[in-house]
Image (cartoon, coloured by chain):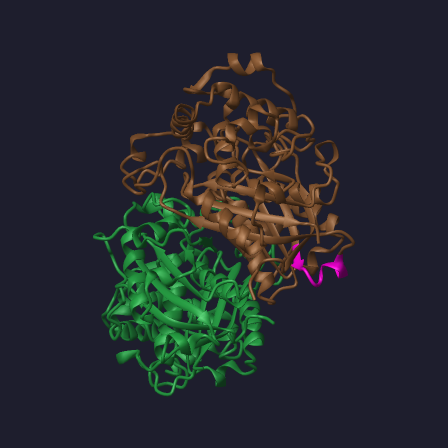
Chain colours: A brown, B green
Amino acid sequence: MGLGGKVAIIGTGIIKFGENFHQSLTDMVFEAVSLALADAKIEAKQLQAAWLGCYEPMLYGFEGNSGTFVSDPLNLFPIPVTRVAAYCATGIEAVRNAALAVASGEYDLVLAIGAEKMREVPSRGSLVAQAVNRGHPVLSKGRTAPGMFALLATRYMKEYGAGEEALGAVAMKNHYHGSLNPKAHFQKEITAEQYQKAPKVAEPLGLFDCCPTTDGAAAAILTRADLAPKFADTYTIIRGIAYAVTAGYWNTQFDPSWNFTSFRSTREAAQAAYTMAGVTDPAKEMQVAECHDCFTITEIVNYEDLGFAKPGEGWKFATGGVTKLGGDLPVNTSGGLKSCGHPIGASGVRMIANIHDQLLGRAGKMQVQGARMGLAHNLGGPGAVSAVAVLSQP
Amino acid sequence: MGLGGKVAIIGTGIIKFGENFHQSLTDMVFEAVSLALADAKIEAKQLQAAWLGCYEPMLYGFEGNSGTFVSDPLNLFPIPVTRVAAYCATGIEAVRNAALAVASGEYDLVLAIGAEKMREVPSRGSLVAQAVNRGHPVLSKGRTAPGMFALLATRYMKEYGAGEEALGAVAMKNHYHGSLNPKAHFQKEITAEQYQKAPKVAEPLGLFDCCPTTDGAAAAILTRADLAPKFADTYTIIRGIAYAVTAGYWNTQFDPSWNFTSFRSTREAAQAAYTMAGVTDPAKEMQVAECHDCFTITEIVNYEDLGFAKPGEGWKFATGGVTKLGGDLPVNTSGGLKSCGHPIGASGVRMIANIHDQLLGRAGKMQVQGARMGLAHNLGGPGAVSAVAVLSQP
C-alpha cells in the first residue's frame, strides 16, 4: 500500500517561459500538453483523468476557476480534470494528486499540468499584490513578498555570519544556469558588478535577488510504475511526494517557533517525501535538485531545510560552488525561479520535468553527469506550505 | 484495484446554512469539521490529510486561495490540505480526490470539507456575476445563470409538453422538504398561489424557481472500507464517485449535440459512477437522491440525465409526486439547493452528508424509510461539469 515507488513519469513538456503576450492561458496549456503527449508517444484520447495546477486562472484569462480550459482546447471530454490551488506549491500539488489517483488503481494514464498567466495586468491588481494575505494582523499592514524575505535575509546573515556575496553567488549561479536553458525567461549571465550595482528592492535584496513575473506552463504524463515499460522505453519513478501545511505567515503569534531562518513546512514536506522514498541522507543520495528560489535567500535556507546542508551552513554551499553545475550537488540547473520566472501553477511541474530530463540524461547543456535521483521543491503560502517530490531512475 | 467500494464515510457534519454574517469562512470550516470529528468520534490529530472544496475563498474572506484556512483554526499542521475548485461541482470533487487518496493506501483517515461564503459582497462583484465565463463569444454577452436556465426551461416545456405547474411542483416539494430540515437556509413551505404570483426572474423562471445565495459548510471523514469497523459502528460505503468535464456553455458551436434539454456532463458522470458501483438500473436501485436543483428545471432534467426517468418524462415525476417524501424515489429531501441554498464548495459535501444520514436512518423528519443506496449529484460549469457519488449501506 501507499504511493512511494508506485507511479512513473513517461513524458513531459515545458513551453518557453517568459512574457507570452502572444498566448492565452488556454494556448499555453495546449502547447505544454501537446509537448508532453508527443514526448510520451501517446494520444490525448488515451488519457483517463487530469489534474491542473493553476493558482489564479480568473485574474488573467477569464478561463474559469476550474479545469475546463484544459479539456476545451484538447478535446479531452468527458474525462475528469481536477483543478488544485496551493499558493506557490500549486504545481507539485497537481502532480501529487495525480499520483495518488494513479496509485489508487482507478486510472492507468493521467495528465498533470501546471500553468499560470501573470504578465497582463497592472501590478496593483496582480496576483503578487493579492498574494499577501490581508486577513492576518501582521500581513494586513501591507507587507510584500520582497519585504518579507528581506527580513529572512537580514536575520540569516546576522545569525550565521553570511555576507551579501552569498546571495550574489546564488543569483550569478542561477543566471549562469539560465543561460544554458532554452526554455528560461532570462537566458543571460550576470557579473558580480551587475549584481552589486542593481537597485535595491527591499534591503538587502536587490533586483537580481528576486525572481521575475512570468507566463509559463509545463505538463507530465503519469502511469503506474508496473505499466510504464508498456508505454515507454525510458521513464522515471516518483519515489516520494508530499505536501505540508504549517503555521506560517512570518508571525510568531501563529508559530512561536518561527525564527526567520528556516521553514517548518519545507522540513515537514521533505521528511515526509524522504520517508516515502526511503531516503535517509538526502545530501548524499540526491545528485540534482530544483528548489524554490523565489529570492536568493530562500534557496540558501532551502539547502538547510531540505537536509543538504547543516543549519547555518547553507550559504557556504553557494559561495563554495557546491550547488553550481560541476559541483557536488547542482541545484536549479534550469536557472531556477530566478531565470525561469515563477508562473505559480507551472513552476512545480516545470521543476519535476527538469529533474525527469536530468535522470534521463537529456538535459542538454544543463546535464548533471550521473544523476540517478533528484528532487523538486516548492515553498509558498507565504512560508506556510511546501511540497517535495523525489524522483529516481527505475 | 480501483476506487469503487474501497472507501467508507464514518462521520459527517453540516452547519446551519443561511446568511451567516456572524461567521467568517474560517469560522464555518471550523464548525463543520468539529461536527464531523465529533460524529466520527475521532480527534483532529488523527487526520492524515484533507481536501477542501472552495470555489472562491478570496472573493469573500481573503482567506487565501489554498487550504491553509482549514489547517489554521483546527491546528492540523503539518498534514496536507489540498484545495480543489470545479465550478458548482467543487464539493463532490473534494470528496472524490479524498477518496482516491484513501484508495491509494497512502492515507487511512482523511477529511473532506466544502465551504463557501457568498452573502457579503454586492451582487456586481459577486461570484454569481463572475461565474459567467467572459472568455466565450456567447457568454460574453452578459448571459446570467437564470437567463441560461430559462432557455432550458422554455425548450424543455415546448419539446415535451410540460407546463409551468411541473416547475412549481419541484419548487413546492423542495420548500416542503426544506421545512423539515433544521440546517436549511429556507425552512418554510410555499403554496401554489405564492409560486404563481412570484415575480419573474427570467421567463418562465420566477423567484421560487431559483436557489438563493447562501453561506454554508459541510464535512465528511473518510477511511478505507476495510478499516471502517475499527473506527465506527455505523458507516456508509462510496460505491462509485465520478466527475466529468464536457463541452458546454449553452453553445452549439462548442457542442453540436447540445439540445437545451439534457446535460452530457451529468450523463457521463452518472454512467462512470454507476459502472464503478455496479449499478445497472438507478431508478430501481436508488431509494433516495440529492441532485443539483439550482433551478427547478434543472432538477427535472437531472431526473432524466441520471437515468431515473426516460427523456421527456422527468416532469411527470414532479407533478406525480414520485420524488416527494413518501413517493417512490424521493429527491432532495434536504430541500435541495432551493431550500438549503448553494454555497458552491459546500453543496456537494452537504448532499453526501445528507445521503449518509439517510442510509444510517438518522435523517429525522426527512427520513426515507428503507433507504439502502442513494446518490448525490452536482452540475456546474455552466453545464460543462458534473459529479456523481453513489453511497450505500455496507
* Residue A324 against residue B12 in the figure, above or below: above
Q: Quadrant of the C terminus of chain B?
A: bottom left
Residue range highlighted in magenta = A222-231
Quarter holding residue B328: bottom left
Residue A224 is one of the magenta-drawn residues: yes
**Residue A294 visible in image:** no
**Residue A357 visible in image:** yes
Q: Position of residue B122 (x, y in %)?
A: 29, 45
* Residue B339 against residue A153 in the figure, above or below: below
Quarter holding residue B81: bottom left
Q: Position of residue A374 (x, y in %)?
A: 63, 44
| Residue at 24% across, 55% down | B20
Q: Position of residue B289 (x, y in %)?
A: 42, 76
Q: Quick one: A37 or A237, which is closer to the camera?
A: A237
| Residue at 73% across, 31% down | A365
Left or right: B270 with respect to B49? Answer: right
